[in-house]
Image (cartoon, helix red, strand yellow):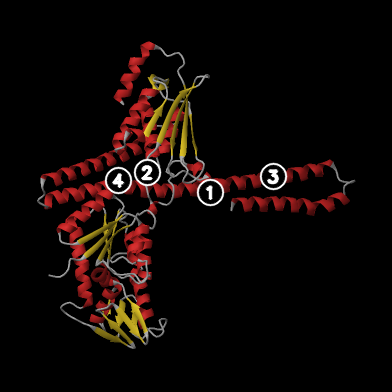
Amino acid sequence: MGVSLIVMAVALTVGWQILGAPDELRAAREVSTARWVVYFLGSLLFLLLIAGLVSIVILLVREVRLNERQSNFISAVTHELKTPVASLKLYLDTLQLRDLPESRREDFYRTMRQDLDRLNATINNVLNAAMYTERPVVDPHPLDLGRLVRRGIELTRTRHQLPPAAIRFHGPEAVMVRGDAGALETAVLNLLDNAVKYSKEQVEVEVELSADGDGHVHLRVRDHGIGMSRHQLRFVFSRFYRIGPEVRRSRPGTGLGLFIVRSVIKSHGGTVSADSPGPERGSTFTVTLPGLIETPAEHAPEAVADATRA
Amino acid sequence: MPPAPRVLVVEDEAHLAAGIKFNLEVEGYEVEVVDDGTRALGRLVSPPPPAEVFDLVVLDVMLPGVDGFALAARMREAGNFTPVLMLTAKSLPEDVVYGLEQGADDYLAKPFELSVLLARIKGLLRRREWARGGQDAMGTVRVGGAEVDFRSFEVRVGGDVHRLTLLETMLLKHLVQNAGRVVSKGEILERVWNLSPETETRAVDNFVVRLRRYLEPNPRFPKHLHTVRGAGYRLEL
């Protein structure tokens, strides 16, 4: 729609010029410069008008897209919140209604614990999206990103009950950066969680951490999962964006995970990008952060303490 | 002892599916679980003709592949009239009505009470029996040139046979039982749909339009199923 409007506007300008031109040529000699000025101003105004129109259309399209995502988000959060609640209620009712053997009861308790974890994760996600903004971190501490990433991998393996080989780590022992350990841990966990969530039957994730010569730290998370199209790549970091309509959802989530990742990384003065050779061919997420080149030994213990607290 | 009723549970959330299956099995049902829409389509719609191997379907709305609304609609189109109990986190009246219009027979919002779920399932199976005949057996009824068979959920007109969903049958049965009297929309919503009489919906009107298509020689000028302006509907046998 936007494109056709632009084409129409341009056609109108050109047409108007052509219509005006013969008159102009005939009278050219007598015409005073004042008339030219009027002409020029007229064209300029007209162009301004078109520019305004075009920007309104662009804004409108954006608004509509955001609206769509927002209603998808409500749908996703409703589902993410109500599903574990429904499950908890069902199992509680079952425990209350039926006489069950001990082993069966243990099974049900385990299921309920997982539901609670899921509920908690969704709540944290929504709260984090509101809490972590792109504004620079207020009180950054030196911390070891290598340790933080390894801990994140450990946690993700436990959460999804994966063998050690499912997520492999390559990188040096310690890579120092300056930042908010809690926020960075959330970002790293979101990336890892996504890599597992969008994997196919067999989970195969490679995590690579490196520091280059110009003081940058790179974190690369690569999966062999469902991948993304060019169009999807454009929107993955947008708030509320999820692949496909919610009514045919195939994976849990709220559309906030990568939005949070981007906010956190930006607030640390870094960048994050997504890449995929195409659908069904895996995705790679790359985070670049400013590193702490002179690793001050006296700060290290503090950083570790920070990471554990988070 | 009659064979155990067979229930298909279409639910992608593993915990919910397992919980429902466990409870239904304890209640003596035979249960199969399918966790995505496409596979459910395979069990309920294709290969044609759809074998009605299940006595009841518990259907989630948000499903990978094909969503629950579309699945219910496809079932009905393909001529599978197994009663459907829809489960979903969406509980706005529009969603309820949309689900019912797509072919669901009853509707339960998540989170639900286990006792309510079991009662609804029992109710749906019983309603089917009731619509078929049950104690106040009705068998077949003639409406003008059409013959309505409440046992097989069929309307036969001339050589044509139309199959009815459970809700269509229930509505028609209610109208037949009250033939000659004006039945209000609120009464229909309450008695047939199990909804509050104040629910804002065009569902009843849509169902009446559908019934007319089966019963009336010319649906635009009904001779049997009349609309009584501002009051409701009246069926003349």
Label 4: how many residues lie within 10 Å, few (<14), some (14-19) or many (20+)? Answer: some
All told, the count of numbered labels is 4
Label 1, secondary structure: give it.
helix
- Chain letter of the residue carrying label 2: A
Between A74 and B65, the one nearer to me in the picture = B65
Q: Which residue is mark 3?
A: A45
Of the residues tagged 1 and 3, which is closer to the observer? Answer: 1
Of the residues tagged 4 and 3, which is closer to the observer? Answer: 4
Q: Which residue is mark 1?
A: A61
- Mark sitting on residue B123: none
> Split into 4 quadrants, where in the image is the C terminus of chain A?
top left
Label 3, secondary structure: give it.
helix
Residue A7 shown left or right of residue B226 in the figure: right
Q: CA distance from mark 2 to mark 4?
A: 10 Å
The earlier-in-sequence mark between 4 and 3 is 3
- Residue A25 is situated, as x and y percent measured from the top left of the image, at 86, 49
The earlier-in-sequence mark between 1 and 4 is 1
Q: Is residue A209 above or below residue A205?
A: above
Q: Amino acid at mark 4?
A: Leu
Q: Are marks 2 and 3 in contact (CB under 8 Å)?
A: no
The earlier-in-sequence mark between 1 and 3 is 3
Q: Can marks 1 and 4 be said to lie on one chain?
A: yes
The earlier-in-sequence mark between 2 and 4 is 4
- Residue A101 is situated, as x and y percent measured from the top left of the image, at 10, 47
Label 4, secondary structure: give it.
helix
- Residue B112 is situated, as x and y percent measured from the top left of the image, at 22, 54
Q: CA distance from mark 1 to mark 3?
A: 24 Å
- Mark sitting on residue A254: 2
- Mark sitting on residue A81: 4
Q: Amino acid at mark 2?
A: Thr
For the point 15% across and 57% down, the residue is B26
Between A57 and A109, the one nearer to me in the picture = A109
